[in-house]
Image: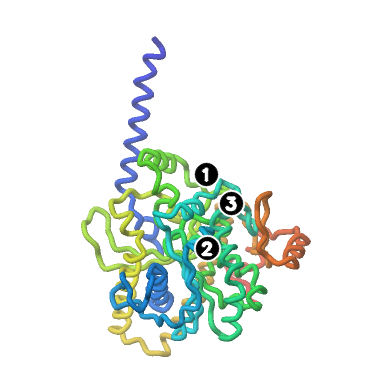
Amino acid sequence: MSLACGIPLIECIYCVACARWAWKRCLHTAGHDSEHWGLATPDEFEPVPHLCRLILAVYEEDLNNPQWPPDGGYRIDPDFIIVRKKYEHTLGRAPPYIIYLDRSNSDIVLAIRGLNLAKESDYAVLLDNRLGQMKFDGGYVHNGLLKAAGWVLDAECDTLRDLLEKNPGYTLTVSGHSLGAGVAAMLAMLVVQNRDRLGNIERKRIRCFAIAPARCMSLNLAVRYADDDFLPRTATPLEDIFNLPCLLCLRCMRDTCVPEERMLKDPRRLYAPGRLYHIVERKPFKCGRFPPVVRTAVPVDGRFEHIVLSCNATSDHAIIWIEREAQRALNLMLEKDRIMEIPQKQRMERQVTLEREHSEEYRAALRRAVTLAVPHAYAPSPYGTFDGSNSQNFATGEDSSRSRKSKHKESWDELIERLFEKDESGHMVLRKA
């Protein structure tokens, strides 16, 4: 009798939980996560459409006779594609990619294509991960993506080093979309930690643009490497898009009921990497698309952690749509600058101010991480380290031995104390060199 009386109560609790979840899902949009972010400038966002076209070029068999050219064409010279690797070359260990020598921008670009729904090897890379399986530089990373990035680095290390030696002053840009974006993010971290393999390239010459990447690194690494240029991921983890709808619904309900404070304190949970740029073109309770606006920030909490159910999720994730909307957003920003007629001197001053603001925003993210007690928050080590019984070490032998000798890791509190000091009014200010 008592059991029978308890069943209606359980049903009521379940219905209330479902109603709460549905209400939050209907009201929440991806724009809520970035509503307090600052606006991006044309100078910092200008490379994005160009890199999107380079990623699209990986899909083409013959760029001289393209089958799916974007509006205005690819705007690249096929003769300067140094390396083109397809699935038969990578043997399923990494997605296809190209290396392009961009003479017009003094840049060497490694562009990696996104997930191929017809290739089991891509699923194998994406699903080769367990919570807390792979450690890297004091945090956790996606095991399959890291192994794919290590394979690409080993395969193209000599080619990239030769290109950098023959073109001094050129930057090295790693870019990718979807699955390839996760590999690109991991590859950028490997390159930063093993610069000696590329002729000791300066840290400031290494960039990464990850277009809609999968969650690939723990929060402490995502914030620490925010001085790189990364782009936002999709609202839904890529691992869940291809599961049964009922499993996706259960994942949504689970993430909705788990407090965000609890998620932030899980050191194994993976996040989108680095500084985020969000192209916003929809508004709540309004139909259609609006002129795109680009927002940017280095958030600690609110890194697109809410799963948004949308009928446009698949189309918004497509690289061809991102390229089109990114180009539209850039054209609007350039048109606004043209109307304002900003003098060249002020443009240069704005660029210096932008770099200073990004640096201050990066350090503010570090302070925010301390406030939220993010675990395993250490300053970046000078050498790449891979811990774990099944991990691979892509660093050189000399770097590995030095890493083992350096056992002490600087905590967040020590890092903040070293970077900041209090002024006369008691406010935290950046410590002068």
Q: Which quadrant does the C terminus fall into?
A: bottom right
Q: Looking at the image, which residue sits at the far top?
A: 1
| Mark positioned earlier in the residue sequence (1 or 3) | 1
Q: Amino acid at mark 1?
A: Arg
Mark 2 or mark 1, whichever is nearer to me? 2
User: At label 3, which amino acid type do we have?
Assistant: Ala
- Quarter assignment of residue 280: bottom left
Q: Which mark is residue 262?
A: 1
Q: Which residue is mark 2?
A: 90
Residue 108 placement (x, y as % from top left):
51, 78
Label 2 – label 3 distance at C-alpha:
41 Å
Pick the residue in front: 413 or 427: 413
Q: Secondary structure at mark 2?
A: helix
Residue 46: give x, y in percent of width and height.
40, 77
Which residue type carries mark 2?
A: Thr
Residue underneath mark 3: 373
Residue drawn 37% across and 15% down? 5
Residue 301 is situated, as x and y percent measured from the top left of the image, at 48, 54
Q: Residue at x 34, y 35 (%)?
A: 18
Q: Which mark is residue 51?
A: none
Q: Mark 2 or mark 3: which is in front?
A: 2
Residue at the image position 39 percent from the left and 49 percent from the top: 241
